[in-house]
Amino acid sequence: MNFRLTAALGIVGLVLVATLLLLTFFSPEDSPSSEGSLFPQLAGVKPEDIDTVEIERENQSPIIFRRTGPQRWIMEWEARDASGQKVPLKAAADALAVNDIVRELLRAKPIQHPELTSNPALHGLQPAGLTVTLRSGDTSARIDIGDVTSGGRAVAFVMIPDKKHPLAINRSVIDPLLSNTQKSGKAADLAKSEGDFRNKNIFPVESFRAEEESQKLELSLVNQQKSFVLEKTSGGWQFQLPKDWGMADVQGDPQSAPGTFTGVRPLLNALTSLRASSKSDFVELPTAEQLKQYGLQNDDPELIQVRLTTKDKETATVFIGKPDTPEPKGDKKEVPLPTGDEKRWVRVEGQPGIIRVGGANLKGLIPLIQNPDPLRDRNLLTVDRARIDGLDLSTGVILRRVGTPPEWKLFGPPTPMEPQAVNTTAVQRMLDLLGERRIIRSFPSPNDAHFAGPALQLEIKVWADAFTSTSDAKAEPKLKDNAKPIILKIGKKEGDAVYVRRILPDGSSADYLLPEKVKLAAAGDTLVDLVATLQKTRLDLLDPNLKTFGSDAVVKLTVSGSVQYELTRSEKPDSGTNKYRWTFAAPDNRKGQSADSETVEEMLRLLGTTQSVSRYINETPTEEQLKEYGLAPNPQLKVVVHLQSGEDKERTYEFGKATADPGYVFARQAGKAIVFTLPKLVMDRFLTSDLRDKSLLQFDATQVVSVQLKGWGKAGFLTELHFTKNKDGAWAAQTPPTPAGYMLDPSKLQAFLDLLSKTKVKAFLDGTSKPEYGLENDKEYLIITLKFTDGTERVLKLGAAADGGAALYAWTSLGGGQFLTLDASPFKPYKDSPGSLAR
């Protein structure tokens, strides 16, 4: 029991000692806590309210940051020159870096840490090597920073004026102040220097927005009296110097060689991409020898001056010197930097010292200043193509973009009552050519003679956002007040070039030389003729497309003129062939006869799939002109196609005479005055096709009840066979006339009937029988007579060989009696011997 009491008293004693030790190190008001801000005096102050940041470093010049704008800071410090004298310096600071310091310190809080003591010396705080002061107006807060730790629970030990003992904060709070965020040690030894806080950008705009944010650009070779000046206007970038050079190209040639400049945007992107990489790129107080070495002394013959003014009227003047040439390290050869990584030395007006920068290839800058011609706008049209809503051509063409979605239509005479659909390919090709980039070859002096009298080939008015929008595609849009077009005059041709004058809406004009043949990127770099592509008439721009239809949609066909007939289609497909049957409704002598379905469908297929006219001839022909075309008083051939359904169930085509090219004929569609041409083949199909039904002989073999054959006279006598089918469907020979003992093979007879039922006419023969047909020669003919369950009868007489033995002459009783030819080979065994049907 005494031992237990002793142990208990010992534990209590240890607790008391530990408590006394804690009280020794921490007074109640100074005890570590994770509650509350480090700077209660800045409570409610936002990062953007901090206007000054001061950094004091042991044995170094203080750095003072002063806010000059929402995202702008300048920094002030002192450096020693070659004589050891202190020189005050001021430069633009890295706003992001300064903002990080402010943001982290304002939200910093003390935290608990097991190594924290009340002794400042144990935490590198006596004295502190790094001190930061934040100011917002008259209110300020200061923090001394001592040692920092690394690892998973890295902290920094700090002191603030109203606390008597050290505090611990997360190391991340002070990382924006440190050049090495991984090491542990004294914060002063790890702290950033002036170069770390310098703004690495040379110009006040970011490269990705340089063209949008810039207003004026001046480049000059200071000691060569060479310069050019560009300024952004409402119409784009324009040369102010040289004078009268007009517009500059914004985009430039995407195929230009590296380091060369053909557009304002690539030039600005390159210049504003220049930036320092690290603090070693800054030389605060360069010597005269260094300025000479880097080509930055005032009398250097290749010293480049760049003055960039932003749209906010902020101006930066930068002098660009020579490329940086790193000194070789021993015997090790320097590997040349990639072209885009070329380093150069620059001097920024208003900033101390010189700076080594990279990020752009500037090898083409001096040649550009000496001759800025590559920057001239070589685009005929700079207006956005999507804004173009009208084109007027001196050929009488009026094009407007109307409707929802918008599409191009032809307006104006000679058909003012309704806008016409356009040849989309031709219109798009015109727009492709007008919008093709960099097609201007050169910039000749203005000369009215190039556009006077017959020299003027064409005038085009290009309207952009000029018309009131309308969803009605049939209503011509109205011109907006004060809308003015860009006028293009296509003038004299000289060699392989054409003079073009462009007059902008503000009245300014310029003359250009364009190549006669232009390579169109939109057409796969195809060469197109400049004048021929643009000099279009209404007939060239009318929509050449004809409405198509499927042959299976046609229910009636009426043809009149040189030939006359009318065909109607059956309501349902034939059950045997699953095809529609076509029947003559006219003329009277053929009414009710079958027409050849395949021939009719082929005719309709040819007409229905003729998608476009060959070319338009006359939009408003007179009666006399229609007579010349063979379309008046009546067309030579008129074809009316009646469709099963649709808005325009009746399509009428009129065909006239052959054109100068005999392969084409004049034609038009009923209800439309315009005359066009179509291939003569289309007309000929309706004019000359033999419509007699080549399936004339076909029948349902199951309906045959009697078969009689007579022929085979080459044996010196005629043989007759007669077979009948009983009520049970069995075939039997009838004797006589069938020779006694003839053993019929029913399967062979069925095969013979199947052959007959599917036989198609090879060709129809007009006129009367001829001796060579062999149809009256008992040594040649074979007469086949079929009787059907309905009591009807049909006769087929096979005759002599035709077409060198490939066919047979034949006659059928169908259709009033018709001569024809059939393929010979299927009938050869039956025509050679009566035994072909025997067992």
Image (tube, rainbow, N blue to C red):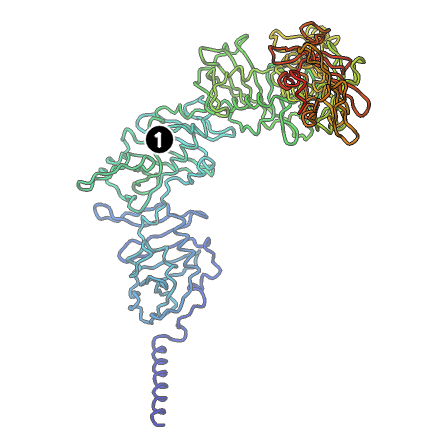
Q: Nearest the camera: 376 or 777?
A: 777
Q: Which residue is mark 1?
A: 259
Q: Is residue 229 visible?
A: no
Quadrant location of residue 792?
top right
Q: In the current view of this chain or complex, which residue is farthest to the front? A: 741
Q: Nearest the camera: 251 or 734?
A: 734
Q: Is residue 109 visible?
A: yes
Local secondary structure at mark 1: loop
Identity of the residue drawn at 38% across and 75% down: 27
The N terminus sits in image quarter: bottom left
Percent of width and height locating residue 104:
41, 57
Q: Is residue 236 above or below residue 102?
A: above
Q: Is residue 249 above or below residue 160?
A: above
Percent of width and height locating residue 503:
53, 20
Identity of the residue drawn at 68% across and 13% down: 712
Q: Is residue 318 above or below residue 522?
A: below
Quadrant location of residue 667?
top right
Which amino acid, by three-letter code, is at mark 1? Gly
Percent of width and height locating residue 498:
48, 14
